[in-house]
Image: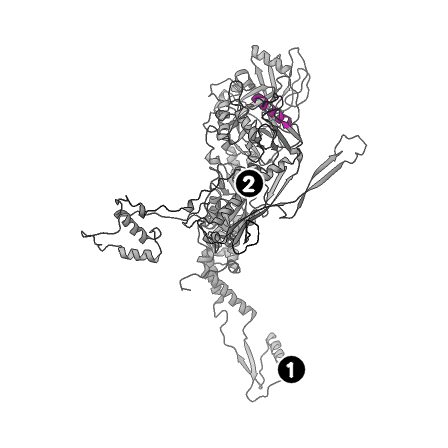
Amino acid sequence: MGRGSAPRVGRTEALSVPAVQRGRNLICSIATLPLVQYGPDRSVVTNLLLQQIDPDVANVVTLAQTIEDLLFDGLSWWRITGFGWDGYPTNARHLDVGSVSLQPPAGRSPAPLPGGHDPREAVVYVDGQPVPASEMIRFDSPNPALLKVAGRAIRRAILLDQAAAMYADEPRPLDFFTPAEGADPADDADIKEMLEAWKQARKSRGTAYVPAALKYNAVDQPTPADLQLVELQKRATLDIANALGLDPEDLGLSTTSRTYQNATDRRQDRINDVLSPYMRSITDRLSMGDVTKRGHVVRFDLDDYMRADPRTRWDVYEKAHTMGAITVPEIRAEENMPALTSTPTPTETTSETEKAGSVDVKASNDTALNLSTDEKSGMVFTDVPSSTFSVDEGKREIIGLAVPYGRVAVNMFRKWRFDAGSLKFADLGRVKLLRDHDRSQAIGRAVEMTETPDGVVMKFRVARGPEGDRALALAADGVLDGLSVGVDFDMATDTVPDPSNKGVTLVRRADLREVSLTAMPAFDDSRVTSVAASRDGGTEMKCATCGQIHAEGVACTATTTAVTEQPTTNGGTFDADAMTKAFMAALQGVNQKPAETEQRQVVNPTRLTASVTSEALPYRFDRGGNFLPTEHVFSADLHAMSLSNDQYGTETDAGKRVMSLLQAAFADTRTTDVTDLNPTIQRPDMYVDQRDYRTPLWNMVKKGAPPNGVNPFRFPKFSAASGLVGDHTEGVEPASGSFDATGQTVTPTALSGKASITREVWDMGGNPAVSTLIFNQMLRGYREGLEQAVATFLNTLTAAADINLNTGATAGSAPTSAQLAGNWEAALADLQFIRGYDFDAFALEANLYKAFVAAKDSSGRPLYPIIAPANANGSAASRFRTLDLAGVVGVPSWALTATPGSVNNSWLFDSSTVHAWASAPQRLEFPGTKPTDGSYAPVAWIDIAIWGYKAFANSDIGGVRQVTYDTTT
């Protein structure tokens, strides 16, 4: 090893040095800080990956291992183990640096083609197995690896520690006795007695006496102090502190007298000088497009780490609250204090003098969402109480709950929940009462809005005239018995994932545009809750504020804050239908391309830095065509090409110079009539393979590999329950109920295949090799076999109920478009009244799929259009890849039987009730058999085989519906 090189030490060896261990612990303390994702508006956005990186390991451990890798080796690896519905990672696992390699293991070619081309995506090898780069997250340290650059200092500290241990374990002898010249040697008992007496005399500090028969000898050897062992150990600790970037005093080494510095300043300096490179290495990587969406960034939350003393914090809070920069709930959240007792949120009454402070609602060019009842299904909140509906025809007023808080709704194929205080408006008088969200049928306006713990209670005054009278009459008769809001908001800035309900979007801010009187309210509990008097004068109804019944003329004493009627002001108009269409276009990919910000990028962890240079012709010639002396010599470059085996002149600078000369020299050469010199060549590397089928059925039900390998496995499930809850009679002990569970056993079965080729074909190889082509075809058959197996398994099920789409059709004919759509929508409506199934998966056989595509209304307009699907109960994706059938996405399946003139089955099911497992296919090679008679021929033939296991199960038949359709009834 050269004198100037730094010897590399192992991580375990380095951590045996106390200074290194202490430094590592200080730097890895970053792992105790929480990682937080911020959205484009600088608000905290929930990120499932940051909440729990590895489901089996605490975040502090995963982050500490990552920082340790960055410190010692300069890089760290995570492997993504779970993706969300949007394609972004939700779980990852830390990998040992030594288990990851960018180079293939020995004996495996880095590219499958001899030309060096690899048609696959970039791969990383984990424990010798290729893993797609899209499943890897690589962290790089801005600092050099400690084990490499500080190896000499660490090695020195280890050697000094060993020397100190030697002196501690084997202290040097200070002196010893030998027999005096001419004296007889003493026996062992006398020697032991004499040494004991000498030892006792030394302890009592008595004067020493050496008998004449003994000679006293003093040892003259260097002591640890003479060797300056302690000073050398301090110097080694100082070198390690400098390599780590830490203050030596952090490692227990005092080097100077320190001036006063409080704890907060000390932590701030440590962040700035030592920890920030490792923190940014992690947060910048997690902020890249393959982990977080565009506009979102990840940062360490330093609030607790940099927290000042309580007095300082509260002084800052007081100033910030006075100037309006922070609210009391935000202050309590910063201090980890529980929320105050829930009370109605005061809503200030806007007046002419306060208009400057009102919320400015403007039309936005960004894609917004209008939640109205454009869909027939509307927005339905689950698990909500029923409320009465009533109308004050005398005062021409309607009062009711417009938006409930804390309820989960379904609309636009997603789940929503409105946060308390989320509704905003510029002018209450501009909020109109419409008839069924039809802007051409405005029948009233809002005059009062009250925030309550249950939601937003609004009062509307109905306009005079025939339309208003008709609306009041229908409402009084219970026909128009609900309210439905029309709001809009920006998905990117106004919503976040609901922290309390997985899969639900929490709306934090929405602009209230209108409220409609409707027979089918967008929110199930959006009902009118109070009436003061009827046209006949005096019907008692519940109060909208406290829920009690008051006598006529008696005012409610409950606390409420209302937004009173204001003079209307001129404001911009808002086209809710246009915003709804824009959102649907973005969601279905109809009118515009999907937003690139929502697509996960892939950061290549195998990236290498490349540079391309362009220069003039490198050689010069005289008039006779001879080379002139220049910086480069043509013959020397040819020799360099030969030594480097750069036959094409693409790998070395010398080769590139030679080839640039040849290209310039023969640029104008004519190549006619040289067919014999340029024969047609074989290009096996351009082999065109058979195309793959899509596998929609398998994608719907796959659950990974069989959990118990090839062995059967069993899982428990609910069977029956009764009498667990009932009305109670005072003094009577309730009867005991019953609960029964059962289990289901799943037994994997095998998939296999074999092909035989001659020894000569095997030995010829090729590019690609015949054996490779055969096995690739086996893999294709394996995947198609799984798809066909799912279709076969579904056809073995006896569904809880069948959906017959031929109902009402004329015998001998297919159902009309209206009958087809009506039967389907009626079946979906019926499914809303069964227990707890989502029915999110719908696979259609070819005849039914084409019937839906061709369905048209009486005017010839497609029922499920691709272009401008306005006022339609569904739509089609581009090229009819999928169909949106009243909110259910239908996928075509080639594996389902589709025989014209016969009843064929399509399948609608809840994907959580149908399961499929399959192992990765294994490639087997062994001495072969003759294809003609199957006789054993180990020399002449070689067999290539494929083997794997599959398993299927239906855990709940109630979540499966068989959809039948016949082209001729």
Q: Judging from the image, what secondary structure is the residue with disc 2 in?
A: helix
Instruction: Give the mark nearest the N terminus, 2 or 1.
Output: 1
Q: Which residues are magenta?
A: 803-832
* Any part of residue 297 in sight: yes
* Any part of residue 337 in sight: no
Give the residue at x 57% y 50%.
Answer: 934
Residue sticking out furthest to the front = 933
x then y, percent, for residue 495: 53, 32
Q: CA distance from mark 2 to mark 1?
A: 92 Å
Q: Which residue is mark 1?
A: 189
Residue 178 position (above or below residue 495) = below
Q: Quadrant of the C terminus?
A: top right
Q: Judging from the image, what secondary structure is the residue with disc 1 in?
A: helix
In depth, the one of 261 and 21 nearer the eye is: 21
* Residue 38 falls left or right of residue 954: left
Q: Can you tell which mark lies on residue 174?
A: none
Residue 117 position (above or below residue 40) = below
Q: Which residue is mark 2?
A: 784
**Coloured how?**
one colour
x then y, percent, for residue 293: 48, 38
At label 1, counting other C-alpha atoms closer than 10 Å, the crowd grade (few under 14, some 14-19, many 20 or more) is few
In depth, the one of 51 and 636 nearer the eye is: 636
* Residue 351 falls left or right of residue 902: left
At label 2, counting other C-alpha atoms closer than 10 Å, the crowd grade (few under 14, some 14-19, many 20 or more) is some
Let me know if residue 823 is in the magenta part: yes
Give the residue at x 57% y 52%.
Answer: 935
x then y, percent, for residue 635: 27, 57
Q: Foreground mark, 2 or 1?
A: 2
Residue type at mark 2: give it: Glu
In depth, the one of 470 and 645 nearer the eye is: 645
